């Protein structure tokens, strides 16, 4: 469910953001590092540091607003 939303956000905001999707089953170390317990977990980073996170699906408008807020 989240993938098409992320694709739509990226299509509109590719100049402001980079979206990285990580398979937690193939990358358990990264999942543990960021305390990912549910899928999807979304984490917004600014300058390499997490500034926002949410477990569960987030909508396009919400993500666009957050990216604008932190950019």
Image (cartoon, rainbow, N blue to C red):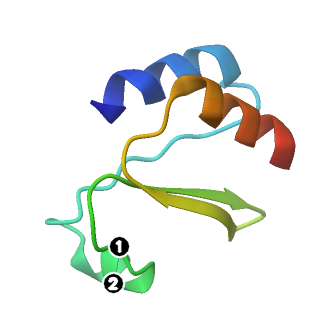
Mark 1 secondary-structure assignment = loop
Give the quadrant of residue 30. bottom left
Q: Nearer the viewer, residue 13 or 35?
A: 35
Q: Position of residue 18 (x, y in %)?
A: 60, 40
Q: Is residue 40 above or below residue 19?
A: below
> x, y (%) of residue 61?
63, 24
Asked if one can make out residue 46 in the rendered structure from this viewpoint, the answer is yes
Quarter occupied by the C terminus: top right
Dot in front, 2 or 1: 1
Q: Is residue 53 above or below residue 65?
A: below
- Asked if the residue under mark 1 is in contact with the one under mark 2, i.e. CB atoms within 8 Å, the reply is yes
Residue, x 78% and y 64% (percent of image)?
Answer: 47
The answer to whether 33 is drawn above or below residue 39 in the figure is below
Judging by the rendered image, the residue that carries numbered circle 1 is 36
22 lies left or right of 66: left
Q: Say which residue label 2 marks.
A: 32
């Amino acid at each position: 469910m989240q993938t098409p939303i992320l694709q739509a956000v990226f299509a509109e905001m590719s100049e402001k953001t980079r979206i990285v999707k990580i398979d937690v089953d193939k990358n358990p170390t990264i999942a543990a590092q960021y305390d990912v317990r549910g899928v999807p977990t979304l984490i917004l980073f600014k300058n390499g540091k997490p500034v926002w996170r949410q477990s569960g699906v987030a909508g396009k408008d919400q993500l666009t607003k957050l990216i604008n807020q932190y950019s």
